[in-house]
Amino acid sequence: MDSRLLQLSHPLSLKSTFLNAIPRSPSISSISIRHFKLESTKNGGRETQRDVPFDEAAYEAERSRLDAQAIKSMAEASIRDTEGASDDDPKAWKWVIRKRIWDFMESQNIAANPRPVHHRIPNFLGAMEAANRLCDLVVFRDSQCVKVNPDSPQKGVRLLTLTGGKKLLTPQPRLRTGFFSIVESGMLTPATIKEACTSVGVAKYGKPIGLDEKIKVDLIVIGSVAVDPKTGARLGKGEGFAELEYGMLRYMGAIDDSTPIVTSVHDCQLVDDIPVEKLLVHDVPVDIVCTPTQVILTNTKIPKPQGIYWEMLSPEKLSQVRILRELKRRIERETGRPLPCGPSEKLPPTAQRSSKPGKRAFSKK
């Protein structure tokens, strides 16, 4: 194993209040659900809506196409950002750590489908065991609404959220088709609850929400490529969507500094070489790390982001993420002043929807 990978072979001792048995799943209503979505049409100059069947095959084909484009774009960006870069370049050193983890997981067959795991939040053998440890936590048990990322290794967390009778808040992949959706077990049948944990299932069974939704998120579950268990420093796959989602939830008042942030990873994703002093203001730290073998409280001292950071968010990226444009317009109306915008950059087609950090946050206040 790479000597730079921190090995924690013994579970840390935790207060008993953090570990409890998973609550029994409540009975799930066996209501019949038809899958429709609303489509706007023009009728005599008036806009009306009609029910149209949800086209699962078309949705999945488009999702796969855009994912492939995004992965290609990230691969190109990683090469571009590391060639000739200095050791202090935040893009460069982050890609070096990510590549080391991805390469190791593939070479040791720790990776699970979808493979290869490069330029993804990597799925891994033991992801369900890590999910079970996460759902043993009292902060999970006491939560009513849990925000979980849409990636493969957290599918088990999404399932346990729903079978535990909680609200599941999950984003549309890469915010490409909307914002967040809420899924509740009462909307599902025993036959559909597992499907509801997938991107297609969220599109079929979830209720889309907007920036005006009054919601309180009790726990955030976030995906990671690498995490330092001693500091809570975390690296995602490099697109910045976890930071965008966190910033928008801050704007909505759905979360604050006290909202716990948990990640589930394989033990080989624990590292000790993420330099805290080189993290940017938008980087989201984690409070708790769950692996297949242990639970770690990081006691992180890294400040949590306070909102969206706009100064380096390019016009091209804003043009590709509708919810960001809506939020920008709202903040500008509320504050009576224009928000800064980052420099223009050439992006590939609509797959690359990443975010760049700035140095100043603009929140609702």
Image (cartoon, grey):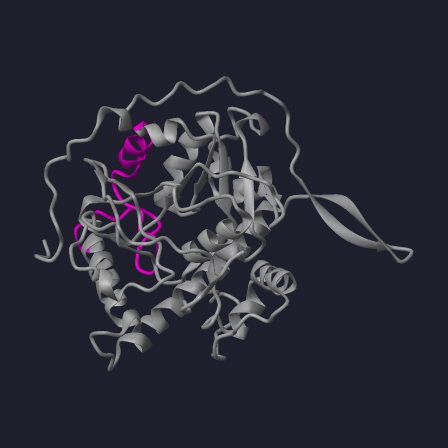
Residue in front for this viewpoint, 29 or 56: 29
Position of 225 relative to 94 (above/below): above
Residue at coordinates 76% horizontally, 52% vertically from top-left?
A: 40
Q: Quadrant of the C terminus?
A: bottom right
Residue at coordinates 59% horizontally, 52% vertically from top-left?
A: 58
Specify the segment rendered in magenta: 107-136
Residue at coordinates 47% horizontally, 72% vertically from top-left?
A: 311
Question: Magenta stretch: residue 166 in it?
Answer: no
Percent from the top left, x then y, of residue 316? 53, 73
Residue in front for this viewpoint, 237 or 308: 308
Percent from the top left, x then y, of residue 283? 35, 59
Residue 243 vs residue 47: left or right?
Answer: left
Query: Looking at the magenta stretch, what is its main secondary structure?
Result: loop
Percent from the top left, x then y, of residue 138? 33, 28
Percent from the top left, x then y, of residue 47? 83, 53
Rendering quarter of residue 221 = top left
Rendering quarter of residue 163 = top left
Residue in front for this viewpoint, 299 or 48: 299
Residue found at the very far bottom of the displayed protein? 84
Residue found at the very far right of the displayed protein? 44
Position of 286 relative to 237 (above/below): above
Residue 276 vs residue 334: left or right?
Answer: left
Number of numbered discs on residues: 0
Position of 86 relative to 109 (above/below): below
Question: Magenta stretch: residue 108 in it?
Answer: yes
Rendering quarter of residue 45 = bottom right
